[in-house]
Image (cartoon, grey):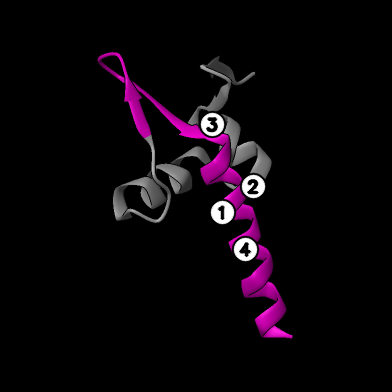
Amino acid sequence: MPIEIAGNKFYTPAEVAKILGTSAAAVRHLMRRGVITAHKFGPRKWYISEAVLLESLSGTAKRSENKS
């Protein structure tokens, strides 16, 4: 379940992995490479904003359209 801060929703890497149909490790790898921008809240918690998630989903759709 995403957290909401100032009207913005934030998801954990595990939640994003479930949405994208991949593993949490793959999401963390994309975060390290800078493909997915994440925000650190607290000493160890990383979150991805809903805006970044939607951008990732639209980017995935564009890449699959280009393969056709």
The magenta span reads: 39-68
Is there a contact, CB below 8 Å, between mark 4 and mark 1?
A: yes
In the displayed structure, does residue 68 sit left or right of residue 5? right
Give the percent coordinates (x, y) of residue 16.
Answer: 58, 37
Residue extending farthest to the left is 43
Q: Are marks 4 and 2 in contact (CB under 8 Å)?
A: yes
User: Between disc 1 and disc 3, whose residue precedes?
Assistant: 3
Question: Is residue 64 found left or right of 26 in the rendered image?
Answer: right
Which residue bears the numbered disc 2? 20
Residue 51 drawn at (x, y percent): 56, 41
| Residue 7 drawn at (x, y percent) | 58, 20
Q: Which residue is mark 4?
A: 60
Q: Assign the magenta stretch its main secondary structure.
A: helix
Residue denoted by label 3: 14
Please report contact status of discs 2 and 3: CB closer than 8 Å, yes or no.
no
Residue at 32% x, 26% y is 40
Seen as rendered, the residue at the extreme front is: 6
Q: Is 65 rendered above or below residue 68? A: above
Q: Earlier in the sequence, mark 4 or mark 3?
A: 3
**Mark 4 Cα shell of 10 Å, populated few (<14), some (14-19), many (≥20):** few
Q: Residues within 10 Å of mark 1 (few under 14, many from 20)?
A: some
Residue on which disc 1 sits: 56
